[in-house]
Image: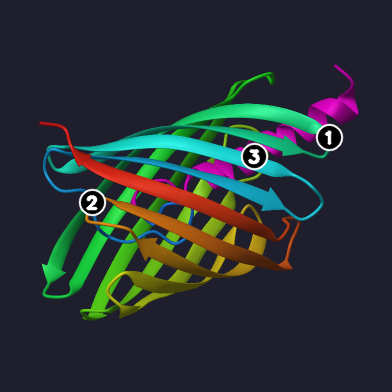
Amino acid sequence: MEKTKLGRLTSLAMLLLACGSTWAAGGHHAVDDAAILLANECELEGWFSRVRGGERLVHAGANCRVGPVELGVASEYARFQGESQTAWGLEAKWAAELAPGFSVGAKAGPAWAAHVRPRYQGVSASALATWQARDNLAVHANLGRDFAHEGEDESRYGASVEWAPVPAWSLVGERYKEGGTHFVRGGVRFLGGEHWSVDLSRSHRLSGPGASAWTLGATWAFDRK
């Protein structure tokens, strides 16, 4: 494989490592909440991102509550700088309420990529916090790091506000850093029922090597009993 092509694939694999850490209750949003699924509950989720410049990313994953933690598995396919790549990842997430309306948590997960050597790309880990200011208003904060198997480690952090002006609709605003890039994101979520939702968001690059993107996602929760 040509050196330039290997470099592009390695960059793509690191992009997938950065994107893969957005699993679990946060869906495709970069800032996750300090909450996990209920006992015996599982969730399927997927999203499609259209990145400025024509790049695409498709994500499909599943999470289940197992005892005190939530475990997840996911796969992603991306088209980046003329090259395509597939990656897989695992994630474990824990959360607990410290005081009424205030919760903390942590999550971590490794990622692997196809068609590159080594396939193991690294692991992402983050600390989580959520403040439920009101029934329809929540503030989330994350602080973590991507530990690359090869290459430089990258810090990741962010904060978001989630507001539900009416029961079926909520608005999300984020300011975050991932993959060495600073972003802001605005999104809207429609709760179609007790168990499913649809999200649409726009991320805007402020600085760094990443690019702005539109993302459409959906989640479906169910009881595994």
Q: Position of residue 153 (x, y in %)?
A: 60, 46
Give the numbered dot on residue 200. none
Tell me where residue 105 appears, x and y as whole percent: 26, 57
Relative image position of residue 43 (x, y in whole percent): 29, 41
Along the polypeptide, which appears first: circle 3 or circle 2?
A: 3
Q: Nearer the viewer, mark 3 or mark 1?
A: 1
Query: Real-space Cα distance between discs 3 and 2?
Result: 26 Å
Identify the element where label 3 is drawn.
Answer: helix
Q: Quadrant of the C terminus?
A: top left
* Mark drawn on residue 82: 1
Q: Which amino acid is tagged 1?
A: Gly
Q: Quadrant of residue 48?
A: top right
* Location of residue 101 with respect to 178 vertically, above or below: below
Report the predominant secondary structure element of the magenta stretch: helix
What amino acid type is highlighted by mark number 3?
Met
Give me the residue at 45% from left, 33% from top.
Answer: 110
**12 drawn magenta:** yes
Marks 1/2: CA distance? 37 Å
